[in-house]
Structure formats: C-alpha cells, structure tokens
Amino acid sequence: MSSPESSRRALLTAALYGAGAVLLTSCGEGNASPPASAPPASDTSDTAAEARIRVTDQRGKALEFDRQVTRVVTIPMPAASLLAAVDRGTGHLAGMHNASWVAMRDGAMGTMFPEALKIPHDIATTDFTPNVESIRALDPDVVVQWSDSQLTAPLEEAGMKVLGIKNTGTQQDVDTWMSLFAAMLGQPDRAVQMKARSDEEQRAIRAEAQGRRSPAPAIIYFNRFSGGLKVAGQSSYNDFYIKLVGGSNPATGPHGLTGSGMVGVDVEQVLAWDPDIILLGNFDDAMPNDLYSNPVWQSVSAVKSRRVYKVPLGGYRWDPPGQESPLMWRWLSDISFPSVQPSSLRAKIDGYFDFLYGHRPTRSETDKILWNEINGQSANYGQFNAS
C-alpha cells in the first residue's frame, strides 16, 4: 500500500502535468524525508539524479536543471512580478524587461520589494528582442521569453536555457506560467495553492454574475488611449473578464470588430457603441479626466454618468492576466454592479497580498493601487474607501 506521502506526490504531479510543468523529481526543502530504500548519503550519483528538475515549456521543449534555479531573467512583461509572487520575493530575479521594471516602480512591487528596483532592466527592446550580451553577463540559470522562435533562438544560440511561454489571452496561461516557475524554483506546492485560490475566486464571481437580473452594462477597455485608440477585441483577456463579471463588450458584439487582441479604432466607432463604462489601461498615461474634460466625448453614456475608470495597478498591472487577476475581477464586478454597501475589495487585497507577497498593504498603499484619488471623481468609487 502506498504511503500518504507518496499519494500526495502522485496528486501533485498530476496537477502539475495539467498545468504545464511536466516533471519534478525533487521538490526541495518542502519534501518529507526520503524513504528507507533511499541510497546512503555517500552514494551521490542517484541523489544528484533525484535533484534534477525537468519542465516542458509552452513550445513543447523539455528543459532540465540539476538543481533549483536561483537566477532567472524574464523578458515577457508579466513574468517578473509573477515570479516574485510564486517566490514571495525578488531574490531569484536577476533581470527583467524595462516595462516590468516601470510597473514595479510605479506600482506596489517597488514598495514591497525596494531591492527589485536595483535589478538590471536593460535586457530587451520594446518588442522583446533580447540583448544577448547584457543577459549573458547576468549569468542566468534560465531566461523566460515569449515562445516566438525569432525571440528565443538568439539566446539559445548563445548557450542559454530558455523557457518559452505563450499568451493566448486565457487564465490557463497564468496557471501554466505559475506551474513552470514554481517547478523551476523547487516549490510545486505553491502553484497548486495559487491556482486553487484563483479558481475559487473565479467560481464566486461567475456565480454572482449568473444570479443577477440586472442588464449587462456595455464596457470598453482601452489598451491605448493617448496617441491612438486601441480597444480589447476578440480573444483578449479583457474581453474574458468583462463577460465573466456579467458585462458585454461592444467591440466583440454584433457591431464589433473583426480583429483579435488589441484593435485600433476611431472616435466615431466608440461614439456609435456608446459604452456604459470605459476602462483606461495602464499601458499609457490616460486618466478619466482626459475624457470628462474633452468635448469630443461628452455624448458618451460612460462620460455623462461619470463611469470612466483607471484600471488598478498593484504588484503588476491588473489589465492583463496575472497573479492578481482575481482582484481585477472583483473590482470590475463592483464598479459594473455597484452596491450601496462598501465593497469587500480592500479586505481581499489585504489577504491576497499577504498570500502572494507576505505583505499587507497600508491604507495609503491600497489607495494608490486603486487610483483612489484619480478614480474618486467617478461614480460609485466611494465604495472602495477605507472604513
């Protein structure tokens, strides 16, 4: 009969297979003592084999490490903060994309982990082309990169291990990234815990949406507003969570756009859609007052009812998929279907940040995450005020 520990390992391995981490032969310090049949300490050959970590990335490429990784360079923008959440710190982050660093500087991560702002971040161009020499100088165990062969090949040709990841605009991507990172760091249980908590939050939000009788508000997300309009179209993560909370996205409706992802539009198209709610993303500096004060937008329902909101910025931007997405779902649900009662979001932020980062934000830190001062001029935002 198998032991409770062996059963636990079997369940954990099955969970990681489904999320993208193919095989973890050693789970590090979290493991129980080895079985009685383990080789004696003097026999190091089998012990070294057991310590190897094997993962298969989203390209289907297998990578093997002879120990838990300790130096990771991340190029995809969400990857740096996600690694920090899995690791509950930035000690194993050796380099990151400049856009990741900017989000840390402007968001909560720089406050929680001020040492992260000293990490090199000149390692890739804005289109994710790696600066091979700069990255090689950081001596990474692995480089996390988007899976496009043009982006991975220069690194691999230089002799570096590359973990290729994809972004298909689904929550499953986040689950996979978490599992891959947790496996490399020797902390597979961490990914299981993070996914379980995210799944629980998603079930709760979905149940609330299905139980409502209120009409679905029309919600537009601007990925870019300043210098050219881009909205979330088909197959975007933003379209997913707009519909998750019970809203509708005119950009993917009957009179929507044919393109997928972030699609350029003109002002006339947005005026024709006449959205009830407008979300301004964190990839440019647009703020609600840019619409409230501009005569061009005065006929739009979202402007007339003052329902224009800057998306929160926490450990990372809440716009794309990430470890704080459950908080984004709650925030969007509450502004889409406001209650006369105070929102539970501040308490959720407190608990979630403690779980992810070992940090409970102060009142002013939470105000900053939620853009309380800027969004405070918009309707129903008082529900997020501290009691």
Image (cartoon, rainbow, N blue to C red):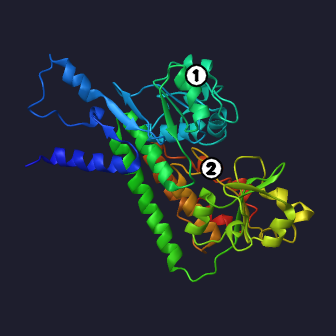
C-beta proximity under 8 Å, tags 1 and 2: no
Task: Decide: is 108 above or below 262.
Answer: above
**In the image, 214: left or right of 280?**
left
Instruction: Name the mark on residue 369.
Output: 2
**In the image, 63: left or right of 273?**
left
Look at label 1 and name its amino acid.
Ile
Instruction: Name the mark on residue 135.
Output: 1
What residue sits 52% from the left and 54% below the top? 349
**In the image, 239: left or right of 36?**
right
Task: Decide: is 310 above or below 108.
Answer: below
Label 2: element kind: helix
**Residue 111 placement (x, y as % from top left):** 58, 37
**In the image, 345: left or right of 367?**
left
What residue sits 84% from the left and 56% below the top? 290
Total count of labels: 2
- Foreground of the two, 16 or 305: 16
Q: Quadrant of the C terminus?
A: bottom right
